[in-house]
Structure formats: structure tokens, C-alpha cells
Amino acid sequence: MNIGITCYPVAGGSGIVATELGQQLATRGHQVHFISYALPFRLDRFQQNLYFHGVETTAYPLFKHPPYTLSLAAKMAEVVCQYNLEILHVHYAVPHATSAFLAKQLITCKIPKIITTLHGTDITLVGADPSYYDITRFSINASDGITAVSAYLAEETKREFKINKEIAVIPNFFDNSRFNPDAQSCKRRSFAEDREPIIAHISNFRPVKRITDVIDIFDRINREMPAKLLLIGEGPDAILARRQANKRNLNDRIVFLGNQDRVEAILPVADLFLLPSEEESFGLAALEALACGVPVIGTLGNGMVEVIEDGINGFLLPVGDTVAMARAGIDLLKDETRLGQFKQKARELAYARFDSARIVAQYENYYTKILNG
Ligand code: GMT
């Protein structure tokens, strides 16, 4: 198939999923065309069957913000006709589903099917904002196919946006050729003494991630058993993390690693992963940790329940209950046998349910179903 993919190119779950999907589809022989304002994060190497088309926006004194949605729509229409795209698969509804709708009106060749994949905050935060609500609802409804990364998100979308169309649930996945237990990873010694547990967190440091809870949980664990915390990612709340680390005298216990594109080389040295988010449609970072054999502490009442098995490969606890999260972490880290079992289950369940071969095939089948009307 000839497939166009639009996503945010910056570090973040939706961009990672879109990029890895494109890479896998290209490996399977499809022609894949990325259309975005920059080369997506993790699309870092040449690959056969994979192309990138940059979207330029033009500044003008009248514009407070250059209208990216329009430039993207025009580029989509151009690439569709030039490369006979049959499918335009947009990731993150705002504004990509709207640009795809506009592109469809512009196209003078065969009209492709538009598939929108909902990722999370496009529904729960941004799309639900009154200024975007109506246009987001319209654009989702105008798509030929809609997928969501969890059953939780599909339900939230139907409830919040009163969508009556079918929303197919296709979960996120990890690339098993990269997240490979034998892959070369960094050394534990680079971060911690032999007996110190290593705890990790990856996010885009937005308020929804509750980064101060990460520090609080770690502080409580570290007081009972000296440990190290690896923080991966960047974002507006990184400053809060640094301030709190200072205030609690944890500077020599926390390593700020910034954005990293090869998390699979770092995660295997960790013993525990923290994702105490307010909300997560899925929690791709949690899945990547599990795939590296790292148990996860996450929160209840969101899509993480579809990824983490409470008491088997991690724990799901109420949002904000840092005392219970720290307790669960300490008890697990102190019990070597149980920790070993959790680590093994983490990897086993990730491979059994979310490995790329299984999930990418679901996308292929979905494309075929939509193409066949
Ligand atoms: O909001 C974010 O953290 C970024 C966002 C994105 O689109 O990059 O992440 C969302 O999509 C990921 C990929 O599908 C999911 O794994 C995340 O759970 C989801 N984030 C939230 O729902 C908060």
C-alpha cells in the first residue's frame, strides 16, 4: 500500500508510535510517506520505502502564528497525488484530522481514505478545550476510520465527543528488534553502587505526569533504602523536578538524562519504573519499561490498566497516593525473589501482548478493511 503518515515529530508517545509504525510498514514492503514540519524523533536512519516530506509555513506580519494547519493540508494534498497515496493516517487528532479533511477537499486525483488515530491528550485535554471541541469532533467524525490506543480512550472519546462511529482499538506496541534482552545496554555501574536499586521515569514533563509525585515517591524509597533515580525526557515541569530535588537534598541521587532516543539501552539497568500520571490513555513509556523487564508503578482509573497487571508486573494505585506507591516499591525492591518474578512477568506479558509484529498486522488489516469500504 501507499501510505501517508502525519504526526508530531517531537519526542512524545504519539510521534514515537507513528514513527515506529511507519518503519515497520516500510519493512513489510509498503511505501510510507511521512508528512510533518520536521523529521520525526526516532526516524534517524535511512530506510528503504520510507520518505519524508517537510511542511513549510510562511511568516507574515499579519500572522500572530503561521497557519500550520493550512500548510499541512496543502502538503498532504500535493503528496497524495504525487505518490498515489491510498491512505492518509494521521496521529493525534488536533489539528491533523482537520488538515486531512481540508486536504481531501483540495485533492484532484483519487481521494485517499483518512484514518485518525487518537492518542490521549488530543481527546482528554486539548480536544476537550472549548476552543477546539467542535472542530475536533467534526474532524474525527469526518475520518473514514478511527482508531484509539486503548479501550479506555475509545470509551472516553465516545463519551466526551458523542461519536457514534466505530472506534477500533489498536494498542501501542514496542519494536522487539530494538527492545531485545540481548541488546547492548549501558552498565548499572554508570549510575549506581552494586546494592543500590535504580528507579527510572520517562516523560515529557508535563503537569499530567505529576513529576513532583515521582520525586516524592523516590524520596520516600531512598530514605529507607539508598537508591538512584534516572529521569529521562524534557518539558515544562523539568524545572519543578530540579527544584524539588534541591529542596530535598537529592541532587546526588538523581540523574537528569534529558531526551534520549535509545531508551532501550538505559531501561534494562532499572529495577522499577514510576509513572504516577493523573491520566494516561495507554502509557507507552510503561510498556517500554516492561519490555525491558522493569516492573512499573502506575495509577488507577485510566488506560494503564490495559498495560500493567496489578500485583503481577507492577502496581496500580490511586493518583496522588505517593505513600502507598513508595510502600509498594520498597516492599518489592526488598524482596529479591518477588522482584525477579515481577521482572520476568514484565517482559513476558509485554512480548505476549504488545510485540510489534502482532500490532502492526492489526493496522494492516484495518487499512484493508477501510480501503474495502
Ligand atoms: O500527553 C503526552 O504525554 C504525549 C502524548 C503524545 O501524544 O505524544 O501521549 C499520549 O499518547 C501516547 C501514545 O499513544 C500514550 O501512550 C500516552 O499514554 C498518551 N498520554 C496521555 O494520555 C497523557
Image: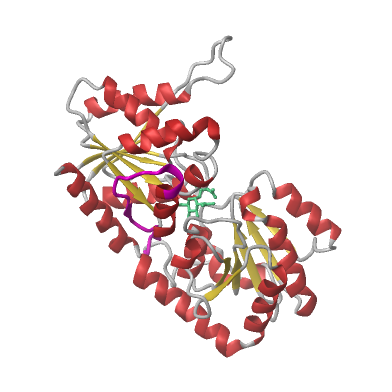
Q: Looking at the image, which residue is at 18% across and 49% down? A: 369
- What is the x, y in percent for residue 11? 52, 46
Which sits in the foreground, 316 or 199? 316
**Residue at the limit of the structure toward the bottom, as seen here:** 337
**With 224 as the anchor, is 304 left or right in this view?**
left
Residue 41 located left or right of residue 18: right
* The quarter of the displayed image where residue 162 is located: top left
Magenta range is 159-176
Can the viewer see residue 35? no
Question: Across the whole image, how many numbered discs are drawn on residues?
Answer: 0
Magenta region, main secondary structure: loop
Where, quadrant-wise, is the N terminus in this rendering?
top left
Applied colour scheme? secondary structure
Name, please, the residue furthest toward the top. 61
Give the residue drawn at x 22%, y 30%: 83
Can the viewer see residue 255 in this picture?
yes
Q: Is 117 one of the magenta-colored residues? A: no
- What quarter of the picture does the C terminus occupy? top left
The structure residue drawn at horizontal position 52% and vertical position 19%, both measured from the top left corner, is: 66
The picture quadrant where one finds residue 45 is top left
Please state if 321 lies on the left or on the right of 174 as rendered: right
